[in-house]
Structures are given as structure tokens and as C-alpha cells.
Image (cartoon, grey):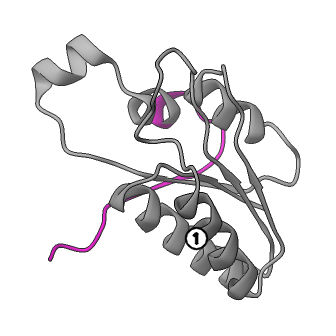
Amino acid sequence: MIVIGYTADAFGQAALDHGIAEARLRDTGVLVINSTAGDSYADPAFAQGDRARDVTARLASSGVPSEFVQPVGVDAAGELLAAMERPEAELLVIGVKHRNPVGKLLLGSVSQQVLLECPKPVLAVKPAES
């Protein structure tokens, strides 16, 4: 199984595309996780409405077995790391954003935490430049 850390932006879309491609290569399924801490009224990274339906449709048309989960009130890095503890999880795919050193220091980074703590391979991808 390929675990995909999805966010409702171009970085999440890149992770979704690459995760599906890896699942096809490995002849396995995907688990797409789009989580939110739920500590604000709106989380732009959390897929809602049309965006969530688009993810579901993309997974349905991909031809790979898939599951799309959206846990609320959780730590994103913790959810991804917990999913990677499953025996069938073989690769984690995440989208990464370029951040300056001060931004990394002040805000922390889900990507950085996952890259450092994940016991299995992590594929970090960026969207294609336009």
C-alpha cells in the first residue's frame, strides 16, 4: 500500500498523482490521508465539497484500490506516521513546499518531521513548474 499525504493544493495534487503512479508500478493500492487539526474555522489544506469529490473521482478512475480518509482534530504528521506503521504500508508520498530557514524554525514542518521520523521510504514531490 502507498500512503499519500494529501493537501487541497497543487502540492497535494502532485502527491496524489505520484502516489497513484507508484501504486500502479508496485501493483498495490493507496491510502490517501487529508487531515486537519481542526483548530481554526477553515483549513485551506483540508479538502471539502468539490475538492473532496475531485479526489474521490480521481481515485475511482485510477484503477487502483483506494481509500480516502479525512480525520479531524489530529496531528497531520502523527496520522501519516501511524499509517506507515501498518505492515502493508511500503511508501509514503508527500508534497513539499520550499520554505526559508526562518519559516521552518518558526512554523515547524510536517514534511520535515515525516522525513526524519518515518521508518519506511518517503517520496517527496513538487508540482511541475508552470
Q: SS at mark 1?
A: helix
Residue 40 appears at what percent x and percent y?
46, 18
Q: How busy is the neighbourhood of tag 1: few (under 14 within 10 Å), some, or many (20 plus)?
A: few
In this rendering, position of residue 104 left or right of residue 75: left
Residue at 58%, 80% (x, y): give it.
21
Q: Is residue 123 magenta?
A: yes
Q: Is residue 68 magenta?
A: no
Examine the rendered structure and indicate whether residue 130 appears above or below residue 100: below
Quarter location, residue 31: bottom right
Examine the rendered structure and indicate whether residue 80 appears above or below residue 62: above
Quarter location, residue 26: bottom right
Quadrant of the frame with the C terminus:
bottom left
Examine the rendered structure and indicate whether residue 10 appears above or below residue 92: below
Q: Which residue is farthest right?
A: 87
Quadrant of the frame with the N terminus:
bottom right
Examine the rendered structure and indicate whether residue 51 appears above or below residue 71: below
Residue at 67%, 77% (x, y): give it.
57
> Foreground residue, 107 or 61?
61
Number of labelled discs?
Answer: 1
> Foreground residue, 71 or 78?
71
Residue type indicated by callout 1: Asp
Residue 51 appears at what percent x and percent y?
53, 61
Residue at 75%, 80% (x, y): give it.
60
Quarter location, residue 24: bottom right
In this rendering, position of residue 82 left or right of residue 88: left
Q: Which residue is mark 1?
A: 54
Q: Which residues are magenta?
A: 115-130
Residue at 64%, 24% (x, y): give it.
78
